[in-house]
């Protein structure tokens, strides 16, 4: 082999500079990252087993415990984005043949059902039209009928803007011998959640929404009951990267000496640590209307307008990102995210002004 | 529930500033990140479907094609660290009951065998003592005996410092109806690799070694034959996050309109893009001795010395990280990484000076 001949030449497009325009991100996430967290992302690397990095991981653990309001020992960040945490939850909890009940009122329930099926679970779906939420009676009916070992429900359904009330669901699940798994990717930090009080068994989120860090790591926590189910598994989960028994050790959650498991996304941990620190420094509370997700405001697309024209108009003329619907809400709503450092009244004014401009300038089809 | 009462108080340790000392990282990776790539990591975010981000992803694709020397359409970066790419390879290629042959001469072969077993493959190990490499005759014997559909081999075995010669292995595998899967996490960019010429079917690496970006994304590429095996699958892989049929679409590899799949680690993509750009700007070649991994130099621990004392001495007195052995080489070798911007003669002098100092100052046990 002619080992010093390159057959594929250096691509010209890589010789051009990286172009990243400044833009106001008011979509359902990611949102803009404040300077303090961007600075953390660009700190020089350390080794993934250096004491300072283990210290950052310990900081992240207590930061997540605070954000989730839990004392769970098995609390850590997954080395991937929010979706990876969803998989980590199912991969570790579910074995072939387990029965899983999934509450579906938008895209995240659909995804969860898909993942559980890939793992060989017997999956039952509890369906609600997009935009509605589940009552404890809906849930209890499903628990009685299907006798699942895990119930999945989405706290902040970002495709429709629904905030699912969680009160009483944990107790209900436990009365029926079931674990409660909650997706809080789009809601954490923007809507109250109390993992221990609400008896949530598995809770996860992402770094890129209210925590205001770039996507790349994902907080997750397991109750004692969930941890025991994992320890009782008869088979290994079909992933080593996400195997919670290994991760528990790497994150110092099992009381034993930490062993190398995988090379962690160190810069993501730096920025997640700072996002959690900024949350810990906050003292203000938050208010909410019933079943209205405060982080993502959904607005019905006005009659006669095309949502795509409106979002494109805001991007092209105001450098503002907002988003259309997703999954069941596609074509029906606009989604405006106000998270982290973007959650200011000035930005509310800016987006309202831009929307007024869009209503004036976008074509309106004949009614 | 008293929803405005926090039971877990803001952790004090998060109110302290993030501490990241400057250190020269000459371990087996991650290595130090040059200013240009750190700057890319701290650029403001964009949406994961914005045209500029899709542009960055296209840049990454051609950058990987250049680094791997391949024209494979199915070429992209995984949203996780190198280990996650190893899993993505197996998850997509292997179905329950497939036969996999794994060449084990260090820790990475052991890990690969573990992952393939988790996926229900029938796994056979081809064993060599740590520090040795496989000849084509070793490989052919295994292919004839076990008739695998996939052979896994490590190009740069970072636990022992061995560079596996790849010449002829692709042709050999194809003659026996087997796909060749190569781990190049520790070798890519530091030792020549020619995916198409060498008939490698699946090749992956990490961002944090020679490419000089922080860990968080991982280049991977699939030959046409490997892609066809994935498309022929009878079952879905046990992961949605890593499902290559979805990722192929998200990365624009299948010619169809790109759909949202997951929120990508956008900052990691910025820095990986810059790492690949810097590789494309390089024109110099590289030289190597047979079976000697140029990125990680292994040095036998001198008789009578404790490796832990030497590595601790360098860290404490010279702020230099080097590493001990891993897996089969544990206790036997020191591992010195010279990668990316750390690969300078000044750093060679610095580490040699520090090692001389260590030999003088560390306790030597009585022989």
Image (cartoon, coloured by chain):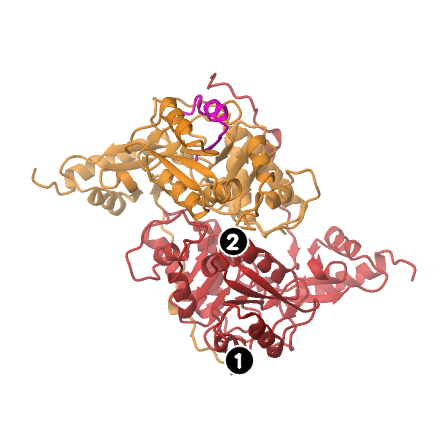
Chain colours: A orange, B red
Q: Residue at x 36, y 34 (%)?
A: A338
Q: Position of residue A85 (x, y in %)?
A: 48, 42
Of residues A131 and B295, which is closer to you in this image?
A131
Q: Position of residue B215 (x, y in %)?
A: 54, 54
Asked whether residue A238 appears in the rendered view, the answer is yes
Vertical position of residue A290 compared to residue B316: above or below: above
Number of residues whose C-alpha sits closer than 10 Å to that of mark 2, classed few (under 14), some (14–19) or many (20 or more): many
**In the image, B163: left or right of A123?**
right
The chain containing the residue under callout 1 comes to A
Q: Which mark is residue B38?
A: 2
Number of residues whose C-alpha sits closer than 10 Å to that of mark 1, classed few (under 14), some (14–19) or many (20 or more): few
Is disc 2 in the same subunit as disc 1? no
Determine which quarter of the picture holds residue A158: top left
> Magenta residues?
A165-184
Q: Position of residue B164 (x, y in %)?
A: 61, 72
Q: Which residue is mark 1?
A: A3
Q: Residue at x 29, y 42 (%)?
A: A327
Asked whether residue A341 appears in the rendered view, the answer is no
Q: Which mark is residue B45?
A: none
Q: Residue at x 64, y 63 (%)?
A: B158
Q: Position of residue B160 (x, y in %)?
A: 68, 65
User: Tag 2's secondary structure?
Assistant: helix
Of residues A47 and A37, which is closer to you in this image?
A47
Closer to us: mark 2 or mark 1?
A: 1
The single residue placed furthest to the left in the displayed view is: A366
Q: Residue at x 49, y 65 (%)?
A: B278
Distance from disc 2 to disc 1, alpha carbons, whole Å, reads 32 Å
**Is residue B255 rendered magenta in the image?**
no
The chain containing the residue under callout 2 comes to B
Vertical position of residue A6 compared to residue B297: above or below: below
């Amino acid at each position: 082999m002619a080992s010093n001949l390159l057959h594929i030449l250096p691509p010209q497009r890589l010789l051009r500079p990286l172009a990243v325009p400044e833009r106001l991100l008011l979509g359902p996430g990611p949102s803009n990252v404040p300077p303090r967290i961007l600075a953390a992302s660009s700190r020089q690397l350390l080794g993934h087993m250096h004491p300072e990095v283990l210290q950052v991981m310990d900081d992240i653990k207590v930061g997540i415990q605070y954000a989730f309001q839990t004392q769970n020992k098995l609390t850590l960040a997954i080395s991937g984005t929010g979706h990876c945490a969803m998989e980590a939850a199912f991969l570790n909890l579910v074995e072939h043949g387990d029965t899983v009940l999934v509450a579906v009122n938008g895209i995240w329930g659909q995804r969860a059902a898909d993942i559980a099926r890939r793992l060989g679970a017997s999956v039952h779906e509890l369906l609600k039209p997009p935009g509605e939420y589940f009552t404890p009676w809906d849930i209890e009916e499903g628990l009685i009928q299907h006798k699942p070992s895990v119930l999945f429900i989405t706290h902040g359904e970002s495709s429709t803007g629904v905030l699912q009330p969680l009160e009483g669901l944990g107790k209900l699940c436990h009365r029926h011998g079931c674990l409660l798994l909650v997706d809080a990717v789009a809601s954490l930090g923007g809507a109250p959640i109390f993992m221990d009080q609400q008896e949530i068994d598995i809770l996860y989120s992402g770094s890129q929404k209210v925590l205001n860090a770039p996507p790349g790591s994902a907080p997750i926590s397991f109750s004692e009951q969930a941890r025991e189910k994992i320890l009782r598994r008869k088979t290994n989960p079909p992933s080593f990267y996400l195997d919670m028994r290994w991760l528990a050790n790497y994150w110092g959650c099992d009381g034993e000496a930490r062993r190398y498991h995988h090379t962690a996304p160190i810069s993501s941990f730096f920025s997640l640590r700072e996002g959690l620190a900024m949350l810990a420094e906050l003292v203000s509370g938050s208010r909410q209307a019933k079943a209205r997700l405060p982080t993502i405001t959904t607005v019905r697309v006005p009659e006669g307008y095309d949502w795509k024209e409106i979002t494109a108009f805001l991007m092209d003329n105001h450098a503002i990102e907002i988003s259309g619907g997703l999954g069941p809400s596609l074509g029906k709503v606009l989604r405006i995210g106000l998270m982290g450092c973007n959650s200011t009244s000035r930005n509310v004014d800016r987006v309202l002004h831009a929307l007024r401009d869009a209503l004036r300038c976008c074509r309106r089809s004949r009614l």
